[in-house]
Image (cartoon, rainbow, N blue to C red):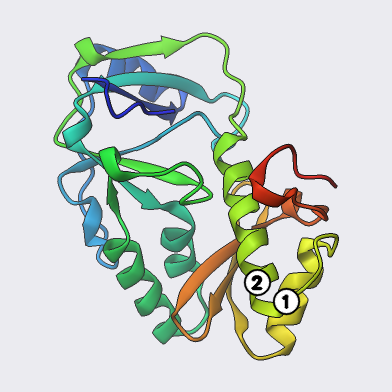
Amino acid sequence: MFDRNNLIASVYLAASRADAEVWLAQGMGPAPAAANLPLGMGRVSAWLAPEPVLTGTETVWLVAVVEPARVLVADWDLACGAAAAPLAEDARRLAEVYSRTATPLTDYRLGQFRRPQALVRGALDPITLARLPDVEPSAEQGAAYARQLYRSLRAMVGAPADVPLIALVAAVVARGRARLVAAYPDPDPIHLYVVDEGGWYFSLAAEFKAITALPEGGVGRIKG
């Protein structure tokens, strides 16, 4: 995880073998901005850590070293939700929140987003890029996010500590406090909910559904 005392930061990119060879030789320029997500204009989209992605079995992972000041961290779930939401108003709001909640890397806290996207200002020079030979997807961000989500939903409904997370989600939906606004693969099914019609959003991943007991104070492991 990023250490705010470091003078450089590592970000990670998933690519096909062909794209990886081009980027290692020529570098990578920023992608043009999407019409509904202008935050990415002039930036390269990467990740804070290697994570499961929808790129197939031939995925090659690269690591780039960059100055922390060049990096914004954004919520990938909000970007996916904006693209997948069936209601235009939900899509618009998700895109707005995606831009508004993007955080400088030096201010980002572990678990703030389930899938933190690293948006690097400007191009990546080939000298800053290297191939990662063996990559294990990281579960650190998702686990921290799930712990915080469990606490928040449990506080909303006043539930005891051994209630399953999926039951907490059902309770806040039944009480009209949350509703499903989008669903999409990433690569497993993800469900994105809005709380209090825009107060905040949360994403529910398949692996979160077995979570039942969160130790008080956040010490120890989530039990499932």
Relative to 32, does residue 136 appear above or below in the rendering?
Answer: above
Looking at the image, residue 29 sits to the left or right of residue 136; the answer is: left
The answer to whether residue 218 of the structure is visible from this angle is yes
Q: Residues within 10 Å of mark 2 (few under 14, many from 20)?
A: few
Q: How many marks?
A: 2
What label does residue 155 carry, if any? 2
For the residue pair 51 and 67, the one nearer the viewer reads as 67
- Placement of 207 over or under 183, stated as above or below: above
Left or right: 122 in relation to 86: left
Marks 2/1: CA–CA distance = 5 Å
- The three-letter amino acid code for the residue at tag 2 is Ala
Circles 2 and 1, Cβ within 8 Å, touching? The answer is: yes
Residue drawn at (47%, 73%) of the image: 200
- Secondary structure of residue under mark 2: helix
The three-letter code of the residue at mark 1 reads Gly
Q: Is residue 14 left or right of residue 23?
A: right
Q: Position of residue 135 (x, y in %)?
A: 57, 18
The N terminus sits in image quarter? top left
Q: Which mark is residue 158?
A: 1
The residue at the point 52 percent across, 80 percent down is 86
Residue 54 in the image: state x and y as whole percent: 56, 41
Q: Quadrant of residue 42?
A: top left
